[in-house]
Amino acid sequence: MDNPATEQDGYYAAERCDLSEFASLVARQLTSAEVPHADAIEKNIPVYNVPALADRLAEANARRALMAEWARILSSGAGVFVLKQALPDHGVIDEATAVYEQIIARESADGAEGADHFAAAGSNDRIWNSLQKLCIAAPYTFIRYFASPAIDAAAEAWLGPNYQITAQVNLVHPGGKAQQAHRDYHLGFQTAEVSATYPAHVHDLSPLMTLQGGIAHCDMPIESGTTKLLPYSQLYRPGYAAWRREDFRAHFEAYCLQLPLDKGDAIFFNPALLHAAGENRSADVHRMVNLLQVSSAFGRAMESVDRLNMCKALYHPLRAAWNAGWLSDAELNAVIAAAAEGYSFPTNLDRDPPTGGLAPETQAALLKASVVSQISEDDLIVRLDGQAARRRP
């Protein structure tokens, strides 16, 4: 559906978003005919029994038909589905949980704070890059944990082959507060101001580049704060502009749904689906989920470029040109865009956490600030090297 925000100038703006249009989209009801392979529909969310799908996942044509169904759900359907017992080996989940608990204890002792992008500090424990940390600490556990044809098929259904998985553990204790309703990576991790600078067609592209998932590490009743979801909300094209508006968030809170999950269940959803982790109102459930952030193989440039050394080589002449008035602000921005890394990710969020927003400072921002403030070349090199070191795995 065309949107007035697109028709006017090719960009979305929060003030032009239409709550009535959004409300109409999320009022849709899923029918069983749309999800013929689902075991059930619970609260407008299709649920699949993975053990019963084992033969289908093992046969190429049947697997492709199932993946096509999941892709339709994510794109034009409810936007979310649950895979019951995607990891039926609860023993390996417990082994991974024990490793994660040791990592949390060690990182906490070292003074690390696993801050959440969309919840108040202190509401949870967070492990950044739980994928690598589990692999290094317990490789045999890692093998058994990720030997899941269902998770592989879910990722491939949305992103195609050669996808890349990253993961972050979120452990929310009793009393842990809820997140605010939001959309996710990529554009969901930008400030409202930055998001508004991307054209409307890029807003359409962003959800196609990643897939959100989560693996339950314990039985999670609704009172433990399972994720609040608003089916079909990914269909609202200007949603990355709208989700911070109070009226949209109020509509989300009024109509969002929650499902209980059992240990070994997995949930997958379109990153544009409006969602939020719930408040843990339980007395004794420490809700642990391994959050999967799966990315398309296509999110890469053609050539590998040493932008760090480019920035170092350019700084002296760039600073001189700026100081002499040879470059306008627009020209300076253009040169920096050609040379420096303008995106915050991927990075090592343990060492390079978000600063003043949802994302760490970029190389491009550091370079421009240094030029404008006319710091010395030696200082600039120290800052660039420090930033590069923080971003390394």
Image: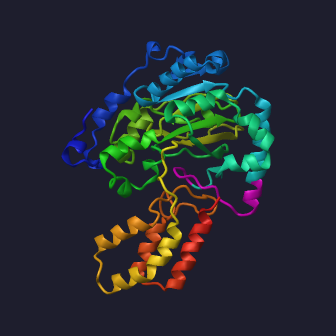
Q: Specify whether residue 246 is in view.
A: no
Quadrant of the rendered image containing residue 258: top right
Q: Residue furthest front?
A: 303
Q: Which residues are magenta?
A: 105-120
- Residue 246: image location, x then y, percent: 37, 46
- Residue 20: image location, x then y, percent: 28, 34
Q: What residue is drawn where x is 33% and y is 55%?
A: 197
Q: How many marks?
A: 0
Q: What residue is drawn where x is 42% and y is 84%?
A: 374
- Residue 156: image location, x then y, percent: 55, 32
Main SS, magenta residues: loop
Quadrant of the rendered image containing residue 21: top left
Q: Specify whether residue 274 is in view.
A: yes
**If the image is split into quadrants, where does the C terminus sit?**
bottom right
Residue 101 appears left or right of 20: right
Inspect the magenta stretch and tell me whether residue 206 lies in it: no
Residue 345 or 286: which is nearer the viewer?
Answer: 345
Residue 60 or 73: which is nearer the viewer?
Answer: 60
Residue 113 or 207: which is nearer the viewer?
Answer: 207
Q: Is residue 353 above or below residue 103?
A: below
- Residue 23: image location, x then y, percent: 33, 31
Q: What residue is drawn where x is 73% and y is 58%?
A: 107
**If the image is split into quadrants, where does the N terminus sit?**
top left
Residue 27 appears left or right of 287: left
